[in-house]
Structures are given as C-alpha cells and as structure tokens.
Image (cartoon, helix red, strand yellow):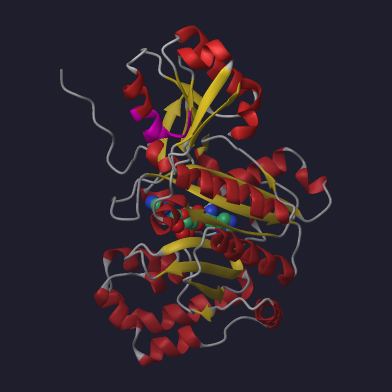
Amino acid sequence: MAIIKIQKGTKDILPSDMPVWYFMEDNARKIFSEYGAKEIRTPIFEATELFARGVGDTTDIVNKEMYTFEKSERSLTLRPENTAGVVRAFIENGMHRLSAPIKLWYKGPMFRYERPQAGRQRQFHQVGVEVFGIKQPTADAEVILMAVNYLNALGLNDLSVELNSLGCPKCREEFKTKLKDVIKPYLSQLCPDCQARFEKNPLRLLDCKVEECKAIYAKPEIQEVIQSDFICEECSEHFSGLKSYLDALKINYSINKLLVRGLDYYNRTVFEIKSNNLGSQNAVCGGGRYDSLVRNLGGEDTPAVGFAMGMERLASLIGNRDDEKTRAFVVSNNTVEGIKLAEELRRAGISAEFDLTNKKFVKQLEKASKVAKFAVILGEDELNSNQVTVKNLDTSEQKTIPREELLKAI
Ligand code: HAM
C-alpha cells in the first residue's frame, strides 16, 4: 500500500531532536520565571475574527496565510501567532484586575500557509512573552532584556538587536501621508503587492523584498521621508527612555528605520533580533508594543509589549545536543530478578533498562554500553552472594559490591 507522507512545510520532531527542544523549553521556564512571568497555554484554534481584528485584515498573515475552516457554521482558524490568543485569554479571564505588570509566557505550534523554505515552515513553534499593564519604556526594556538573556542562556550571543519606533496612530498618520505623497509618482512601477499596500498599509512598503521596489525606496527624496524623525514628542520621549535603559543594561542595538513588522497591532517600539547564520529567514525574534490591542479586542484599555521567537530557527542555531544516557542497564539472564532490580532502581529515582528478550550476556553488555552509563551485572555468583557487579561503561572500571551499596555506587 502507498505510504502516507508528511505534509509540505511540516516536520517531525524526532527523539534524537528532543535534547535541543528540552533545552529550549527548560530554559524558557527558568529564565522567564526569573522575571516573574507565568506560563499560559491557549487553544490552537480560535475564532477567525480574533485574528482578522487582532493581527489586522491588511496583513499577509490574515489575507494569505491562515488555515481557516468551518465547523457548525463557525469560522475557525489555526493560530498563526499567539499574541491575539493571549490577549483574548487575558480579557476573558479578567486578568486586568490583577496587579500590573501581568507577565505571561508561552510556547507551542503556530500555523501559516507560507511558501516553505529554509527557516520557514507551515507549522512551526514559537516561544514568547507578553507583558500587560505598563506604558512606560521600562517594560519595553525588560521585555528586550528577557529575550536577550534567554538567547544567551541558549548559548546564542552572536545576534543583533534592531529597534524602531512606529510612533502612535496620530503621528504615524502624518508619516503615512508624507510617505504616500513622495512614493505616488512611482506607483505604476511598484510590484503588485506594494501597489495593493500603498492604500491599505503604506508602512509595509518599507520592508518589500523586491529589488525594483527597494531601488525606488532608496531614492533620496523617499529616503529623506523614511529617515526623518516623524514621531511626536511623547513617542520620542518613550523611545529615548527605552534607548537609555538599553544603554544602561549594556544591550547592543541598532536603529533600523525600515523595521515595520508584518502585524498591524504595533505602536511605538518594534524590534527584531537577527542572526547572521540563518540565510534569508534570519529573524529569530520579533516583538513590540501594542497598546490598543486589548481595547480593540473588547477589553479595558491596557498597554502591552511582548515578543515571540521561532523555535526551529533557535534549534538550528543551537545545533546538536547529546542525549542523556540511561543511568543503569541491568544485565542478567535471570529475568525475574533482573526486571525486579531495574524497577527498584527506577523507584529510587535512577533511570534503568533491562533486556526484555533475555539475550546472551555479552549481547546485553554490548547494548548496555551503547545506551547506559553503568552496567549493573546480576549473574549467578552475584545472585548467590547477594551482590552486584557495577561496571562504569565510560571508564570500564568494574567492582563487585553488596546489593545495599548499589544506589550509592551509581
Ligand atoms: P512574528 O515576527 O510574526 O511575530 O514571528 C516571530 C518569530 O517567529 C519570527 O521572528 C520567526 O523566528 C518565527 N516565525 C515566524 N513565521 C515563521 C515560519 N513560517 N516558520 C518558522 N518560523 C517562523 C509574531 O508572531 C508576534 N506575535 C510577536 C509578538 C509577541 N509581538 C508582540 N508580542
């Protein structure tokens, strides 16, 4: 019969991959809880409306990339990202009544119908943090600090932080108008995506990857608008505040005026953390401030800031990590005593295996040396004298000891 293959853009995470995934997950829990963040797990599917309203219906994610389906006349969508879902849970569970800041972290699969390529999948995993209730730039700084420290804990230091401020809806409107005015004469030369974005979402013109468009946006009169300090005084103060905290924390960053991010909910701070070792899909982390999202999704006015990282991209930078070996492999042809001793070890908190097929002694020892740190040998002599022989499989050192000394010996 024909075998059924895995879907394009998805990957099995195999047992041999797990050491890296445990490493990322254990560190997420450890590092984020150092900042007082609590884990939240929200459903994989939500009402389609949540993303249309949350992420924004002019974005590529909502327009082209969502896995949407109907059930009982309801339109549902597999989450393409998790900020909208966390905000929904925040509102629905009355978390605004908790004392601010409310810090939440998450990990899990996300789904985007994108063209698969290195570093880009249709099902991928994110680990992320959302901090609610603080409008001051201290929160933005702490969120960036959390991201950087998490990456450092994973041994990833060779990364660059890029920063921008998108201003508030008011100052951004003025900027959009200026940008459109200066780009308008070239409209017919832009790619179809940019032509569509021109009216709906002109900021997104800035991160178009099409060479012809990039050449147009590099023209002096357009660059003058892009590089201008368009943000209002309050937004500018917020941005300066953030920069001074980052300086004090010795976090290196560069300002990238072209950084606009692909989701509609941001205002003021946006940031990305990039790696030079990842090819074209080089962002390991993206985030920013979204002060209107809680209100737009029906909650009380609550400022918020957060980030998410792509775990497959992190995994590819971390590389392989050794699997932890089983502590003890019980080698015995007495199946009853062998199976009992292995279980005794497990109950004492020591991982243990036993050959379930009663193979020859030497075969059992061979297997033990592949998977375990110690062989615990229970032969006829040992059984008769209530002893065990412990062999360290790294050093080949071996000694016979009374049974009651076994736990201490391994
Ligand atoms: P995002 O930039 O869309 O932001 O995604 C964050 C990260 O997820 C990216 O930097 C990348 O590492 C990873 N990622 C995205 N798409 C894919 C894909 N198709 N395959 C593999 N990895 C991918 C967000 O999702 C926002 N919710 C971040 C945020 C949280 N902003 C505020 N709070």
- Answer left or right for 84 relative to 34: left
Q: Quadrant of residue 7?
A: top left
Residue at image position (51%, 69%) is 157
Image quarter in which the C terminus is found: top right
Instruction: Using the image as rendered, state which of residue 48 and residue 145 is in the foreground.
Output: 145
Asked whether residue 312 is drawn in magenta, I would say: no
Q: Which residues are magenta?
A: 366-375
Q: Where's residue 35, x and y in %?
A: 72, 57
Residue at image position (49%, 78%) is 177
Visible in this render: residue 335? yes
Residue at image position (66%, 58%) is 292
Q: Residue furthest top?
A: 336
Q: Where's residue 143, x and y in %?
A: 65, 63
Q: Where's residue 115, x and y in %?
A: 28, 51
Q: Residue furthest left?
A: 1
Q: Is residue 127 above or below residue 324?
A: below
Q: Is residue 366 above or below residue 116?
A: above
Visible in this render: residue 186? no
Instruction: Using the image as rendered, state which of residue 350 and residue 268 is in the foreground.
Output: 350
Q: Is residue 157 above or below residue 403?
A: below
Instruction: Using the image as rendered, state which of residue 108 and residue 170 is in the foreground.
Output: 108
